[in-house]
Image (cartoon, rainbow, N blue to C red):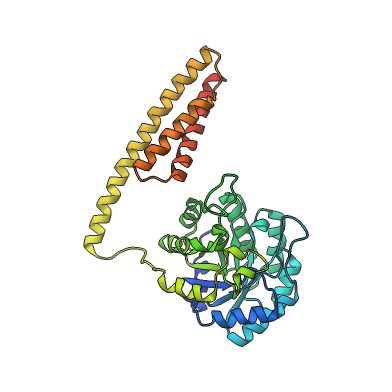
Amino acid sequence: MKNNKNLRTWLNKMELAHPLVIAGPCSAESEAQVLTIAHQLKKTDATVLRAGIWKPRTRPGNFEGVGEIGLKWLKKAKDETGMLTATEVANPTHVELALKNEVDVLWIGARSTVSPFIVQEIAEALKGTDKIVLVKNPVNPDLALWLGAVERLHTSNIEKLGVIHRGFSTYEKTRYRNNPEWQIPIDLQNQFPDLPLILDPSHIAGRRDIIFDLCQTALDLNFDGLMIETHNDPDNAWSDAKQQITPNVLEKLTVDLRVRVEEGDAIEYRNKIANLRTRIDVIDHKLTEILGKRMNIADEIGTLKKENNVAILQSKRWNEILEKMILDGKENKLSEEFVLKIYKAIHQESINHQKRIVNG
């Protein structure tokens, strides 16, 4: 997909605020609920009302959305408040019904993004539409798959495209429901700077107490907007109760968030930032040199193991290294999560080096 400045200009053309705030319940539950939330959100910075109409679930039997009737509730909320409306679509029938009910923003969920077949069907159903279409990242951390979904929509002549970062599944236990893996949306931004990028902190967090911090991080990384699940009675929501906030909390959150400029203009700032970046460049160069030396030692270990017919993986030694590095990391103000991620990558590269020698 080529860079296309039209991908961002829909924000300006529709005179939507920056950052764009999309808010509303995880699921539409009743007409009264949707209308109540919409009127409360009208008093906040939110300009788009979201609500799940069809809710894909891992196992059958759980609440899977109210279905088509919920679109009529969204339409009524739109007529009464003037807010734009948004919902998730997962097949051509959803698209047809959403368009029929004048939904303004349609998004493709993480479970759909993983399937090129599903995305292609949705793209063909949306072909030529002037609606805003947003693509959530796939469940697993796969940038190519994410961009592939966007490309299929772009090929169908959909110009008002954007992406939603909702975090990635991981088998490791972290503080998040879905690990943010910030480097992936950063890489996406670098490749396609004109593609609007929106954060879904609700699905990353899985709980409401860390939503603000995630939103601030996103704005610090130049995200274009936020999609925040908001409910008038979140504790009694029919789905994802723990990660939803009230409109009042949303209003305070958006007031407290700081929107930063992308670059400072002051000469003193530019001189200082240039100096600091140069120092980082020097350290980064040293880091790669040190890692190269470490892998040279790993090669020697691989040779020694091959000569003595010793297994490559030494679990006891690996656990000792991890324990020591976590303690060292704390002394240097490095989080355990960061240390684990770095050293697991180093350990995997070390194993790869030894495997080439032992099996060579």
- As drawn, the residue found furthest toward the bottom would be 80
In which quadrant of the rendered image does the C terminus lie?
top right
Determine if residue 93 is in view. Answer: yes
Determine if residue 195 is in view. Answer: no
* 57 versus 83 height, above or below: above
The mark tally for this picture is 0
- As drawn, the residue found furthest toward the top would be 308
Measured as percent of width and height from the top left, residue 109 is found at 64, 61
Q: Residue at x 33, y 39 (%)?
A: 285
In which quadrant of the rendered image does the N terminus lie?
bottom right
Q: Residue at x 62, y 65 (%)?
A: 241
Q: Image quarter for residue 176?
A: bottom right
- As drawn, the residue found furthest toward the front would be 235
* 211 versus 317 height, above or below: below
Q: Residue at x 44, y 31 (%)?
A: 321
Q: Nearer the viewer, residue 234 or 230?
A: 234
Q: Residue at x 48, y 77 (%)?
A: 45
Measured as percent of width and height from the top left, residue 239 is found at 66, 65
Q: Nearer the viewer, residue 351 or 237?
A: 237
- As drawn, the residue found furthest toward the right would be 61
Question: In the image, is 271 to the left or to the right of 164?
Answer: left
Measured as percent of width and height from the top left, residue 189 is found at 47, 57
Q: Nearer the viewer, residue 307 or 151?
A: 307
Measured as percent of width and height from the top left, residue 327 is found at 40, 38
* 7 versus 171 height, above or below: below
Q: Nearer the viewer, residue 254 or 277?
A: 254
